């Protein structure tokens, strides 16, 4: 994405109505459920559903980073809430995916919790807090690799936070954030298999990761234009994420 287009996209996302933000969440939650059903219960999994699932993480990161740019005073409270929900979701996540991932694999909420903690510590304690936050992310990177994008996911999330923050008004910072986010987005899915199976990896992993998140956001903006009100309960995502993992875990237990 050219820099000027990326800047225009950033402006459009910041101007999304509350209704459009909720619609983005609905689209991403639906894609996530289909992706997980595909991975866990279809043998072999459908490549079309796998490709659709590549939009989920980038979309949630975009909405999370946008929300994080508001009300810096509540950063630690948000981090605490994310840590709690990440821990709540971990048991059903492990039960649902125990045949696919090692026991130490962490669910995706740990990405949001870790980067939110980094931002909260940086906001409160400056450079020392930022270093502490980076230590936390370094500790999370390895257990996030099997199922939650590892260091690429953490870098993408951190770059989006910078892109939506007031410091991005400086052109050099904005440009660095855009380039970093684009590189991390490209690296999220399948890059390690690009030399082995280039066509399959490009079609069902890399291109959907680069294209579908922006399609989903564009569709939400069209369905819920400026002035549209919220239609989902506050913090619905946490309940939906943990709840769908619990449902998947119960189904897996009964099928095993």
Image (cartoon, rainbow, N blue to C red):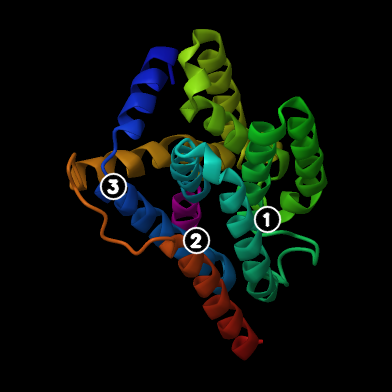
Query: Does residue 108 appear anywhere in the picture?
Result: no
Q: What secondary structure is marked by label 3? A: helix
Tell which circle, 2 or 3, labels the residue nearer the N-terminal end: 3
Above or below 82: residue 209: above
Near-viewer residue (55 or 167): 167
Residue found at x 34% / y 44%: 216
Q: Is residue 245 magenta?
A: no
Q: CA distance from mark 1 to mark 3?
A: 30 Å
Q: Secondary structure at mark 1?
A: helix
What segment is highlighted magenta in the picture? 47-54
Instruction: Give the distance between the C-alpha atoms of the residues marked 2 and 1, in whole angstroms.
Output: 13 Å
Give the vertical position of 218 relative to 181 (above or below): below
Residue located at (63% from left, 33% from top): 123
Residue 1: x and y in percent read: 44, 21
Q: Are marks 2 and 1 in contact (CB under 8 Å)?
A: no
Return the disc, 2 or 1, that comes first in the chain's sequence.
2
Q: Which residue is mark 1?
A: 147
The residue singled out by tag 3 in the image is 18
Q: Which residue in the structure is indicated by mark 2?
A: 35
Local crowd size for mark 2, using a 10 Å CA cut-off: few (<14), some (14–19), many (≥20):
many
């Amino acid at each position: 994405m050219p820099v000027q287009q990326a800047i225009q996209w950033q402006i459009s996302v910041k101007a999304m109505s509350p209704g459009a933000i909720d619609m983005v969440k609905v689209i991403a939650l639906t894609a996530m459920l289909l992706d997980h059903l595909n991975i866990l219960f279809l043998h072999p999994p459908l490549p079309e559903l796998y490709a659709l699932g590549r939009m989920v993480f980038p979309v949630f990161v975009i909405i999370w980073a946008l929300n994080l740019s508001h009300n810096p005073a509540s950063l630690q409270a948000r981090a605490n809430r994310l840590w709690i929900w990440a821990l709540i979701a971990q048991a059903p996540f492990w039960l649902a995916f125990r045949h696919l991932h090692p026991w130490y694999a962490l669910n995706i909420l740990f990405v949001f919790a870790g980067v939110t903690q980094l931002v909260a510590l940086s906001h409160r304690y400056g450079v020392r807090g930022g270093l502490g936050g980076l230590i936390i992310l370094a500790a999370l990177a390895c257990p996030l690799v099997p199922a939650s994008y590892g260091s690429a996911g953490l870098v993408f999330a951190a770059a989006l936070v910078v892109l939506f923050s007031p410091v991005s008004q400086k052109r050099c910072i904005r440009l660095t954030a855009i380039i970093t986010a684009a590189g991390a987005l490209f690296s999220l899915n399948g890059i390690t298999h690009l030399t082995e199976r280039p066509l399959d990896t490009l079609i069902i992993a890399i291109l959907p990761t680069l294209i579908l998140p922006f399609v989903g956001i564009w569709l939400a903006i069209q369905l819920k234009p400026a002035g549209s009100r919220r239609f989902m309960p506050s913090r619905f995502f946490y309940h939906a994420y943990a709840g769908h993992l619990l449902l998947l875990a119960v189904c897996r237990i009964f099928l095993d």
